[in-house]
């Protein structure tokens, strides 16, 4: 049998890829200090196996601290002290002061781009183009958050006078945030909550995802240099040892978590005063594509392949099930399979590579079990070579015809298995969406504006973004990103996230001469950071 994918010899790799591993991280950031960890560590294994000798492979690329309850509470304490019930330097700092710190951080992050990209490729197998895109998108997100905060601040720089009351309304930080991102966007989706939390004046404990820890190492010194002590703190280790005690303390005001709903539910339940806890959650999804009879097939095929297989289907927004009208199913599948066969398989750093090894342990076995389950219930793998796997690499499998009895119909595969169904009546995919536990997005492909408008009017009440003739996706980041049912809580976007970590607070006075004089004095001499009419340029 031909080699499915070429796992390289270590000696074949370029210098910068070789020199960035092994990385044995022993530092964690607490109270403005990079402390050295002397306890137990977690070995890090790459999805990329490399030949260490003729017939043996290795994939160990480093290690990081496994902290315990004591250290995680020490980290939490640093964040609590830095917020100091709103009296801390950071929550009391002027908006322009916080913006300056954030700008410095963005510049520091940019300097570390190639280091982060190399570690991202090693740790989670994301291809070079997408890894670079993730860092650049994160820097842009920081700069856009700065602009959005300026806008928010400008809109709040006026006073309101109503019924004899003068008031200034602004947004104030909620307190201490715990931020946790997922492995598939370890940098971007951790920062998608961490950055707005910080810029609004919260202090933060952040825990990198289980896979994708080392790539955060270069950011630790950048955080240390850019923010006052205790504003950003990190924890590493098993959830039950680190995040459980942090949540149980009751000292977390905002939980920002992107991952699975069972983990989110467990974390929320640990908080002793749930009504005090605000949550921003990005959870599972199983977004469908619906291909109508009059769809432009080349557009539908290209978008569906990209939607189902970019980063090997490991995106919450990936197209995870495809419904094709029966009149065009044969043609669609032929073109779809042809397109998949043109995708390049290889290592994350190979030029133009699309399909790469998967980082989650035992993922290929899980995907294989989905394929076997579907086959046992009447489906076939209809693309050449579909479902072959070797170590961490899994060649995309197109399953057809899929039905409700199969796991692939219900489970979020989060990988390169693509269930396809043929439908006669539009009620079939709609029924799937109505019965699904998820409600993030959907894609519809077609040309008939009458049918499309009636469909989208139905779907907007089931999901939170309907994509016409294009794949599902989160970006551009200025658009709201959320979901119904088990898919999300709260909304992320550059401007929505700023609101998620803050609360409207106002200063109000009765319109008397004395009060007017006090307000004038405060404004004239710029005595308050909250009460002011500054217009940030
Ligand atoms: O994993 C879920 C991500 O939020 C998807 O983001 O659509 O930009 O790939 P994306």
Image: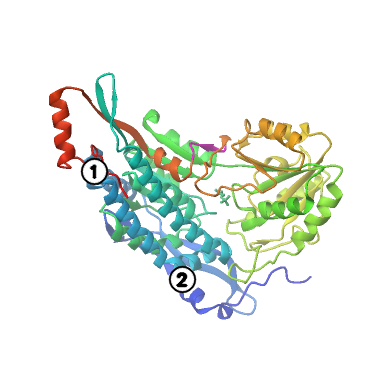
Q: Could you say whether the residue bearing mark 2 is in a helix, strand or loop?
A: loop
Q: Nearer the viewer, residue 476 or 275?
A: 476
Query: Magenta segment, which residues?
Result: 487-491
* Mark 2 → mark 1, Cα distance in angstroms: 41 Å
* Residue at point 72%, 37% (across, down): 452
Q: Do we see residue 319 in this rendering?
A: yes
Q: Which residue is mark 1?
A: 92
Give the image location of residue 496, x and y in percent.
45, 40
Q: Which residue is mark 2?
A: 22
* Residue at point 71%, 60% (across, down): 395
Instruction: Based on the picture, tell me whether residue 415 belongs to the magenta stretch.
Output: no
Horizontal side of residue 38 vs 489, given as left or right: left
- Image quadrant containing the N terminus: bottom right
Q: Is mark 2 within 8 Å of ligand 1?
A: no
**Magenta region, mostly helix, strand or loop?**
loop
Q: Nearer the viewer, residue 483 or 518?
A: 518
Looking at the rendered structure, which numbered label has been put on residue 2? none
* Residue at point 45%, 56% (across, down): 140
Which callout, 2 or 1, points at the residue further toward the start of the chain? 2
* Residue at point 30%, 55% (across, down): 101
Horizontal side of residue 507 vs 198, given as left or right: left
Give the image location of residue 373, x and y in percent.
76, 46
Q: Nearer the viewer, residue 265 or 530?
A: 530
Q: Nearer the viewer, mark 2 or mark 1?
A: 1
Q: Do we see residue 237 in this rendering?
A: no
Q: Residues within 10 Å of mark 1 (few under 14, many from 20)?
A: some
Quadrant in which residue 13 is drawn: bottom right
Q: Could you say whether the residue bearing mark 1 is in a helix, strand or loop?
A: helix
Give the image location of residue 299, x and y in percent.
74, 52
Horizontal side of residue 260 vs 502, given as left or right: right
333 over 342 or under it: above or below = above
Q: Nearer the viewer, residue 104 or 162?
A: 162
């Amino acid at each position: 049998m031909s080699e499915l994918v070429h796992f390289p010899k270590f000696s074949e790799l370029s210098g910068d890829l070789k020199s960035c591993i092994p990385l044995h991280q022993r530092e964690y950031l607490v109270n403005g200090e990079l402390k050295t960890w002397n306890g137990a560590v977690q070995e890090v294994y790459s999805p990329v196996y490399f030949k260490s000798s003729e017939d043996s492979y290795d994939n160990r690329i480093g290690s990081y601290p496994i902290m315990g309850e004591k250290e995680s509470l020490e980290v939490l304490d640093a964040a609590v002290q830095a917020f100091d019930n709103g009296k801390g330097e950071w929550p009391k700092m002027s908006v322009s002061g916080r913006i300056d710190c954030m700008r410095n951080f963005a510049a520091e992050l940019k300097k570390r781009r190639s280091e982060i990209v190399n570690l991202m490729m090693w740790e989670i197998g994301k291809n070079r183009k997408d890894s670079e895109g993730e860092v650049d998108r994160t820097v842009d997100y920081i700069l856009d958050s700065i602009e959005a905060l300026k806008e928010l601040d400008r809109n709040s720089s006026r006073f309101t006078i109503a019924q004899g009351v003068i008031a200034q309304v602004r947004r104030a930080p909620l307190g201490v945030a715990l931020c946790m991102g997922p492995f598939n966007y370890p940098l971007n989706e951790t920062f998608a909550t961490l950055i707005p939390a910080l810029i609004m004046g919260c202090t933060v404990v952040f825990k990198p995802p289980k896979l994708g820890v080392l790539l955060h190492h270069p950011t630790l010194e950048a955080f240390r240099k850019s923010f006052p002590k205790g504003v950003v703190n990190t924890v590493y280790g098993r959830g039950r040892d680190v995040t459980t005690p942090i949540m149980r303390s009751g000292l977390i005001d905002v939980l920002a978590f992107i991952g699975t709903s069972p983990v989110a539910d467990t974390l929320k339940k640990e908080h002793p005063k749930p009504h005090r806890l605000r949550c921003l959650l990005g959870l599972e999804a199983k977004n469908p594509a619906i291909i109508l009879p009059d769809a432009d097939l080349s557009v539908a095929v290209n978008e569906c392949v990209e939607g189902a297989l970019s980063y090997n289907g490991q995106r919450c927004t990936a197209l995870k099930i495809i419904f094709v009208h029966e009149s065009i199913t044969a043609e669609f599948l032929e073109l779809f399979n042809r397109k998949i066969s043109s995708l390049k398989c290889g290592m994350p750093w190979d030029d133009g590579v699309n399909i790469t090894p998967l980082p989650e342990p035992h993922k290929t076995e899980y995907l294989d079990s989905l394929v076997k389950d579907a086959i046992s219930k009447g489906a076939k793998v209809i693309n050449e070579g579909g479902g072959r796997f070797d170590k961490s690499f899994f060649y995309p499998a197109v399953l057809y015809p899929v039905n409700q009895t199969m796991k692939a119909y219900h489970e979020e595969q989060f990988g390169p298995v693509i269930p396809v169904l043929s439908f006669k009546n539009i009620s079939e995919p709609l029924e799937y969406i109505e019965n699904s536990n998820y409600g993030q997005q959907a894609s519809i492909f077609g040309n008939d504006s009458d049918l499309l408008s009636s469909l989208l009017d139905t779907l907007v009440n089931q999901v939170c973004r309907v994509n016409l003739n294009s794949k599902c996706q989160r970006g551009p980041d200025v658009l709201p990103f959320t979901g119904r049912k088990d898919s999300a809580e709260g909304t992320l976007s550059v401007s929505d996230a700023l609101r998620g970590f803050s609360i409207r607070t106002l200063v109000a006075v009765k319109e008397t001469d004395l009060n007017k004089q006090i307000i004038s004095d405060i404004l004239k001499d710029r005595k308050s950071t909250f009460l002011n009419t500054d217009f940030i340029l």
